Image (tube, helix red, strand yellow):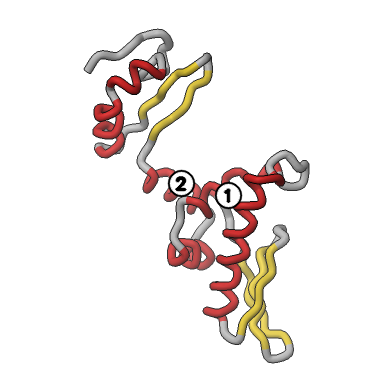
């Protein structure tokens, strides 16, 4: 596999070389490697999504609290502006997943630069690369 040595940390020193070796890039990530690509002075990483999701699963704390209020089940994320409710815990958590998905869309469209939302990048990435079931599992077991 031909690699450009433009930078000590870039596996592929240009987009053109990366494109020529795209199969090698994906083969390396399938083996669990993180591959770096340099383009216009910016370094990007291509990595297995399972590893990235696993990292965010542990690094981003969900801080979900469940409460009963007036016959309804409420799920809220402490320290974050997410509150959902339902007839049962499962309903409240499913509604919370929906709220998170809507937030991730809004974050990419307009909230990313807002000072009170700018630090939610990791949360948004976790939402985007997780299934509903994985997010519900994260509510219960995620974080450090």
Say which mark, if any, is on residue 61.
Answer: none
Q: Which mark is residue 124?
A: 1
Most extreme residue toward the top is 6
- The image quadrant that residue 26 belongs to is top left
- Return the mark for residue 55: 2
Q: Residue at x 31, y 33 (%)?
A: 33
Q: Residue at x 66, y 73 (%)?
A: 84
The residue positioned 50% from the left and 59% from the top of the image is 142
Q: Residue 54's spot in the image, x, y percent?
A: 42, 50
The residue sitting at the right extreme is: 115
Q: Is residue 130 left or right of residue 72?
A: left
Name the one closer to the observer, 27 or 80: 27
In the image, residue 76 lies at what x, y percent? 67, 69
The picture places residue 65, in percent across and down from the top left corner, at: 64, 71
**Position of 101 relative to 10 (above/below):** below
Horizontal relation, residue 101 to residue 52: left or right: right
Q: Along the line of sight, which residue is nearer the eye, 74 or 23?
A: 23
Upstream in the sequence, badge 2 or badge 1? 2
Q: Quadrant of the N terminus?
A: top left
In this rendered view, identify the residue nearer to me: 140 or 134: 134
- Asked which secondary structure carries label 2, the reply is helix
């Amino acid at each position: 596999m031909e690699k450009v040595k433009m930078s000590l940390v870039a596996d592929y020193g240009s987009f053109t070389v990366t494109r020529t070796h795209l199969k090698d890039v994906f083969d390396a990530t399938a083996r669990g490697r993180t591959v770096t690509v340099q383009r216009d002075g910016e370094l990007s990483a291509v990595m297995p999504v399972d590893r990235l999701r696993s990292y965010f699963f542990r690094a981003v704390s969900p801080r979900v609290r469940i409460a009963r209020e007036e016959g309804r089940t409420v799920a809220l994320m402490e320290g974050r502006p997410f509150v959902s409710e339902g007839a049962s815990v499962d309903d409240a958590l499913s509604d919370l997943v929906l709220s998170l998905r809507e937030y991730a869309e809004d974050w990419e469209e307009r909230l990313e630069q807002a000072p009170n939302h700018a630090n939610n990048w990791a949360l948004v990435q976790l939402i985007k690369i997780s299934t509903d079931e994985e997010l519900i599992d994260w509510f219960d077991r995620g974080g450090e």
